[in-house]
Image: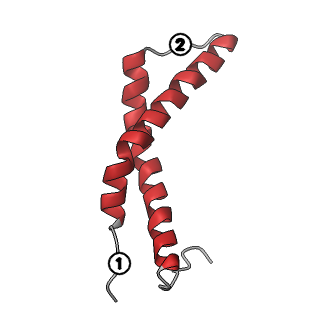
Amino acid sequence: MMRAGWSTRRIALTLYPFGAGAAAVNVFFASLILSWIGGPVLSTNLSIALGCIIGLPATWYFARHIRQLMDVADGGAVRDRHH
């Protein structure tokens, strides 16, 4: 069966800049919160680097979710992965 629309990979590549940016902001804010108990405040560059790393799996899983929603909307079979 041919799937309509974008592949999971294409969705992930398109959304990755947003996922990495969101992860970078969250890493930086987490370091600010941890500074209240004596942790270091991360630099902008380190926050961005960690955001790029954390953003990879987060964006991939989000893209898989979006692809699944597209399949459901198209009437395709939904794969039961964990049950």
* Left or right, 60 with reference to 7: right
For the point 62% across and 13% down, which residue is it? 35
Q: Nearer the viewer, residue 30 or 8?
A: 8
Name the residue: 43% across, 34% down: 21
**Tag shown at residue 4:** 1
Please report contact status of discs 2 and 1: CB closer than 8 Å, yes or no: no
Query: Residue type at mark 2?
Result: Val
Image position of 20 with respect to 46: above or below: below
Reading the chain from its start, which is encountered first: label 2 or label 1? 1
Neighbour class for label 2 at 10 Å: few (<14), some, many (≥20)? some
Real-space CA distance between mark 2 and mark 1, rounded to the nearest whole angstrom = 45 Å
Secondary structure under tag 1 reads loop
Residue 41's label in the rendered image is 2
Mark 1: few, some, or many residues within 10 Å (few <14, many ≥20)?
A: few
The mark closer to the camera, 2 or 1, is: 1
Q: Nearer the viewer, residue 64 or 15?
A: 15
Q: Is residue 31 above or below residue 64?
A: above
In the visual, does 29 lie left or right of 18? right
Quadrant occupied by the C terminus: bottom right
Using the image, determine if residue 52 lies above or below residue 7: above
**Quick check: 26 left or right of 2?**
right
Q: Which mark is residue 48?
A: none
Name the image quarter holding residue 7. Answer: bottom left
| Residue closer to the observer: 40 or 78 | 78
Q: Residue at x 35, y 80 (%)?
A: 3
Amino acid tagged 1: Ala
Secondary structure under tag 2 reads loop
Residue at image coords 48%, 35%: 23
For residue 10, which quarter of the picture?
Answer: bottom left
What is the tally of numbered marks visible in this picture? 2
